[in-house]
Image (cartoon, coloured by chain):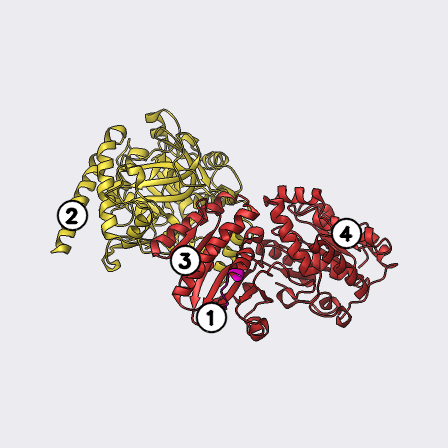
Amino acid sequence: MIAAASNSDRTRLLTDLLGFIETADLDARESSLEPFESLALRLFAYQYERNEPYRRLCQRQGKTPGTVQRWQEIPAVATASFKHVSLFCGDPEEAVAVFHTSGTTEGKPGVHRFRTLVLYRTAALRTFRWACMPDVERLPMLILGPTIEHFPNSSLGQMYSWLREACGTADSRVCFFPDRLDAQAAQAWLLEQALSQRPVMILATSLALWQFVHTVTLPSDFRLPEGSRILDTGGYKGRRLGLARHDYESLVAQKLGLHPEWLFNEYGMTEMSSQYYESRFLTARFGRRAKYGPPWLRSFACDPHDLRPVVEGQTGVLRHCDLANLDSVIMLQTEDLGRFEKDALFLEGRTPGAEPRGCSLLVEDLIRNT
Amino acid sequence: MEASTTPFRTLRTVLSHRAHGPALIAAWQELFEDLAQGKITIAQSVLTNLSRATGLSQRHLQEGLRCQFSGWARCERDPGSWQWPAPLSSNVAVVAAGNVPGVAVPAAVLLSAAGLPVVVKQASADRWLLPWLIEVFEERHPDWAAGIVAQYWPAGSPELEQVLQSADRVIAFGSRETLQELRQRYEERLLAFGPKFSVAIVTADGISPNCVGALARDVALYQQRGCLSVQAVFVIGTTQVATAFADDLADALECTVTRLGYAEEITADRMRKHALCNTLALLGHRYWANDDLRWLVMLVPEFSAERLVGNNTVQVIPVASLQQALGFLQPYRAYVQGCALCGMAIESVEDRLRTAGFSYVASAGAMQSPPLDWANEGIRLPDAFAHPDTHPGSY
């Protein structure tokens, strides 16, 4: 009886969350704040009830569904904790999908389980269209990143596969595999599309895109057809590539023959089901170039010293409240630095880890080598 | 190998006229003893500069340095019994790390006392201590040049490259990346000391206020930046005993860290602490933390390398026996350095600990006081340089 009651609660919550994600006005976040907060508090209560480790964390902080009044007060889980704790509202056997964080130097990956993918899929498709393809139904897609067929535990791979299925034409092409990036095949595909003057969409991780533009030899007058666009994601690891984002964009745009304003960027993570985007369409809509998110995803910056919220415009580590995270945790504490100005998000990289002293180096060493 | 215009040339000239051997060691030990006793005051300029570079308070540095001096004032073995390399038989370059002041001092002193020219490439965070020690030594012994040049050159600078090229042996302290880079270029000549960690092992009946206070100091001195800093305490006893110990350690750390002061960590390290607290709460593990997260004690069922986040963070692990504690550490054998003991005589467990990979075993409170001739990673200086054809070992 209790289990049945729980399940029907979940079903109602899922229905309401899905309804919100399907219908919320993407261009008018302010108007959806009230329903967002109401759903956030309900989701928090559900996760407090069903996610035992999360309940322990909340109790340690003295935060319960009875005391939390605003969405910003919901306790956050550090994304790093996904490596050590099962954060799932239910029996792991019930998971229909299990995504792993991408490899880092720090040992085992984090795990994000889903009992249903409907919220993630709906959120991902709706936001992608809004940000990247509001002007066209389908485009031929070149994918220089994971897809679920080749990377079964990749959350990004799942998203790319959905995007291809829902927004790509039949002649879309995947050129990224576990053992290689097939730059030659990608080049051939692009040349073919260019000949037919059909605009294309390139979905890529930042590093794969970088590798691609440095591997291929396109004609110096090569231009992607008008209306083509590139979305890169995975987080720009500027330090790894040794150049600033602006320089990266200029180089990619120049090599592929399109204006930099058609280079879009996505900010998301395995621990989240929703994403922020930066694109010319959003720039036009909101009046300034920044990242923007859907109404079911709200975030703020925190002071890294004590994790208290900072004032608007001040840089801090980002905390995200994601209504699409039904069966894990709603509030995530990241180590990503950024600031908000109204709804515009400006990312400023990861917390500066300039040559960590002693222990941090030691930990990386130990974990890598034992 | 003949040095041309490097400091080695000058050093070789000076050392060719200077005595060497046990008498030099005794002279250095006397100096360190006077420093440890406070008969000689550390130069204010040294403390000011070190404090600015490390973020540690001058009080903290004084306490840490006096511990180191008291260790360097003694030798484990009689210098008369050492295997001494032939004077001038090798030019030695030492690449120092800056995580803790004075990392290069023992190697520089031991080898220069043997009559080997030693050039120390100092870390940017520690450019003042060794030059000052050399100055004080040479003032006390005008007929004995220290035989050490200590200078700072940026990595990759032509002067540094020339020094390293001119060295017959290169001793390096640092991160794996630093050592790997040096190894690629100087493998045959390199003696490398990489990152390590230390622990404590405590018996239930060894726990006392003195023990807890001493361990708090072993944790907090140099804010866990050094390889001899205690990062975990294994309590041989019940969970109840370990819990009470952790509670007492938390109190002792609050006092110690308040006394020593706290150097604000970089943001990434701060976030690691926050994430660790988050994970501990999710897992239902008990932990104690200062309001400002200046220290963190956690009671956990097993040792984990991922919890070595530094800046006064300690795992307390209840174990049934020494054997169980060593079992937890077995995968990290290549990374353990020192072991502090409470409630056990060093002689009774030292062999087992050395077999487990520890190179320094001491009573609680003495972790920052290894002797001058401590065999770091089992390598004894100057003995290891006594046979030029023998590769002394590398990381």
Image vertical order of residue A153 relative to residue B204, above or below: above
Q: CA distance from mark 3 to mark 1?
A: 21 Å
Chain B colour as displayed: red
Image location (x, y in percent) of residue A160 = 32, 45
> Disc 4 marks which residue?
B134
Viewer-side residue, A31 vs A49: A49
Q: Nearer the viewer, mark 4 or mark 3?
A: 4
Q: CA distance from mark 4 to mark 2?
A: 75 Å
Q: Nearer the viewer, mark 4 or mark 1?
A: 4
Q: Amino acid at mark 1?
A: Gly
Q: How many marks?
A: 4
> Disc 1 marks which residue?
B327
Task: Please give the label number shown on residue A9.
Answer: 2
Magenta span contains residue B210? yes
The reply to whether discs 4 and 2 touch (Cβ–Cβ < 8 Å) is no
Mark earlier in primary sequence (4, 1): 4
Marks 4 and 2 share the same chain: no
Magenta residues span: B206-211
Q: Quadrant of the N terminus of chain A?
A: bottom left
Image vertical order of residue B133 relative to residue A206, above or below: below
Viewer-side residue, A149 vs B207: B207
Q: Is B130 left or right of B201, judged from the image as shown?
A: right
Marks 4 and 3 share the same chain: no
**Chain for disc number 2:** A
Image vertical order of residue A25 relative to residue B62, above or below: above
**Chain for disc number 3:** A
Image location (x, y in percent) of residue A214 = 50, 43
Most extreme residue toward the left is A1
> Disc 3 marks which residue?
A108
